Amino acid sequence: MSDESNQAGESPAARERATIAKLILGIALAGLIVLGIAALGWAQVDERSEVARTLLNALLPVFGTWVGAVVAYYFSRENFETANKSVQAFAKQAAEAGARLRTVPVREAMLPLAKIKLVRLTPEERADLSKVPLKTRLIDILKGPVSRVPVLAKGDKAVYVIHESLLYRFGYERGIAATAEAPFDVNAATLKDFVSHEGVEEMIAAMAFVAAGATLADAKAAMDGVANCKDVFVTANGNKDEAVVGWITNADLERYAEFAA
């Protein structure tokens, strides 16, 4: 980009600052050169070598400082302008995505209860999670595109959302901690073993809820309000003690938000 095109997009104040900066640098550089020549001219012939060395040692840092100032002024300005444009573009895209989410009802985007691959706990199983075999009731469901499984209790109330990655972590950590005296057998593991594993229950209980009349913007706000949350359940009035009628994941929100790009 030429200097003319750069200046054309600048304000008068910016052009004035640039002119002053160039003028000051030019005067200072000329003054240093004149000072150096004068010092060499006034020095005795046999002293000029020492004077030249002294001048070089004194002026090189000054030249370096001025060059650095010029480079910093122009290049940092361009970097700032580029960063500012990137921030503005991101803000615009986020605003467009938010506007798009506000136009989509959750009923349109959610996965209805009838189509969700899930685990329903009986009252006895809810009271005692050790009665739920981990392998046959959960792990075997996680095949193909299914990477997370909601767990519902009586009345289709949401209890947990179990992600495949957490099951892998559980199996790995229990496996490496196993000993001959205390072996780990995934076929014998239960939901209670999994839920009681360090850090697991906090993650699988991270759920948000919205009313059936809400929009995806409401769903995103609800998800953002819960730490580590990646799942939003739709109920009649948005209460967690109501029956689940649909399910929205973080992937669903990202997909709908991308339509705005």
Image (cartoon, rainbow, N blue to C red):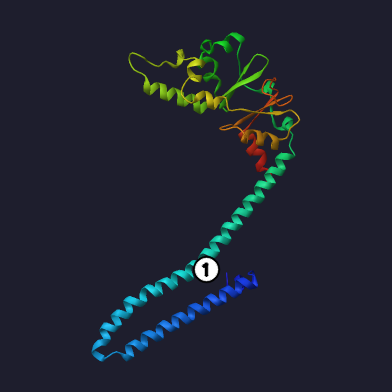
Image position of 161 with respect to 137: above or below: below
Q: Is residue 15 above or below residue 188?
A: below
Disc 1 marks which amino acid?
A: Tyr
Measuring from the top left, give residue 19's x and y in whole percent: 56, 77
Res 188 visible: yes
Q: Name, please, the residue furthest toward the top.
A: 124
Instruction: Work out which residue is located at the far left of the displayed protein and give it.
Output: 46
Q: Name which residue lies at 32% across and 78% down.
A: 56
| Nearer-the-camera pick, 206 or 110 | 206
Indicate the position of residue 30 as horizontal and vertical percent values.
44, 83
* Location of residue 8 in the rendering, given as x and y in whole percent from the top left corner: 64, 72
In the foreground, 141 or 205: 205
Q: Splitting the image into 4 quarters, where does residue 65 fall?
A: bottom left
Task: Give me the residue at 50% from left, 28% from top.
Answer: 165
In the rendered structure, the answer to whether residue 3 lies left or right of residue 55 reads: right
Local crowd size for mark 1, using a 10 Å CA cut-off: few (<14), some (14–19), many (≥20): few
| x, y percent for residue 227 | 57, 33
* Residue visible at 69% across and 24% down in the picture: 239
Q: Quadrant of residue 44?
A: bottom left
Residue 180 in the image: above or below residue 13 = above
Q: Secondary structure at mark 1?
A: helix
- Give the quadrant of the N terminus: bottom right
The residue that disc 1 covers is 74
User: From the viewer's perspective, is residue 1 above or below residue 35?
Assistant: above
- Using residue 69 as the reference point, say whether residue 245 is left or right of it: right
